[in-house]
Image (cartoon, rainbow, N blue to C red):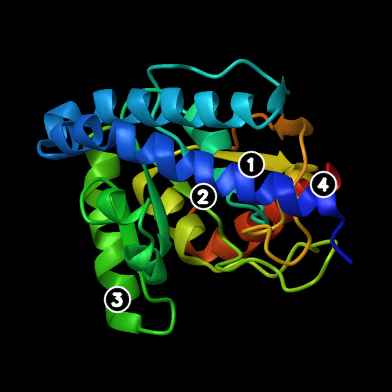
Amino acid sequence: MITFFKRAHRIYSVGLILLLSALFYPLFYWASRKPARYGVLNRLRKINGLLWTSLIGVFFKFKFAAPLDDHQTYIYCANHASTLDIIVFCCLAKGRFHFMGKDELLKNPVLKLFFKTIDIPVNRDSKMSSFRAFKRASENLENGMGLIIFPEGKISDEYPPKLQDFKNGPFRLAIEKQIPIIPVSIQDVWKRMWDDGAAYGTSPGLCHIYVHEPVLTTDLTIDDTDRLKDRIFDLINSKL
């Protein structure tokens, strides 16, 4: 049963993100018009996200297994249980990066601008949609644009959430393009806001994120896709 505090905190959080999104919208719109401005757009997303989470009392603590190269293109793979996961990666990733997410986000009043421009929507029930999405992601990676993807494909219906089976797409792509994968364990963000917070409310607090050492794909072939997928799954799950 949702406590009064958690319900009130959720209403405050949703109202604040809508207000800040409206204030930032002109800047978001301007930066989203040209791919050359995507680095600026991502910095604006980070500023907006940090401002919002700070005002609702949510803070992130990152622990890195190894330093990351700011000049290297990565594919980031993580578990997914909260709307806050997007802000986690706006803080973690550098420069020009983009998300791949479900096409339902095109209906989201806050996120639809991004999924019509910088980010990639995908209908995971459609092979054609998946093909087009990964083709576009492949082209972006070739142009030095990092990819952030949640390989479970959806948020778990279980509470607390459990890591679900991964889709093959990002791992096949990483091998084809010889791009390192960074596994990320988002450990307890769901405690602050599970999915959209409607079922269990939201609350302030410190969130812990473990960033694993990059996994290289230079010596792998397409036949190693399942092995790579299982390795990333085990790494992420080991810190949850």
> Which numbered disc covers residue 220?
2
The amino acid type found where label 2 is placed reads: Leu
- Disc nearer the start of the sequence (4/1): 4
What's the CA distance linking mark 2 and mark 3? 26 Å
Whole-percent x, y for residue 107 in the image: 34, 67
Is residue 2 rendered to the left or right of residue 13?
right
> Badge 2 local density, few (<14 within 10 Å), some, or many (20+)?
some
Q: Any mark on residue 5, and which?
A: 4
Q: Nearer the viewer, mark 2 or mark 3?
A: 3
Q: Residues within 10 Å of mark 3 (few under 14, many from 20)?
A: some
Between marks 4 and 2 in the image, the one whose residue lies nearer the viewer: 4
Examine the rendered structure and indicate whether residue 121 appears above or below residue 139: below
Q: Are marks 3 and 4 in contact (CB under 8 Å)?
A: no
**Lateral position of residue 236 relative to residue 129, left or right:** right
Of the residues under marks 3 and 1, which one precedes in the sequence?
A: 3
Which residue corresponds to mark 1? 183
Give the image location of residue 77, x and y in percent: 57, 47
Where on the picture, by quarter, is residue 92?
A: top right
Q: Depth-wise, is mark 4 or mark 1 nearer the camera?
A: 4
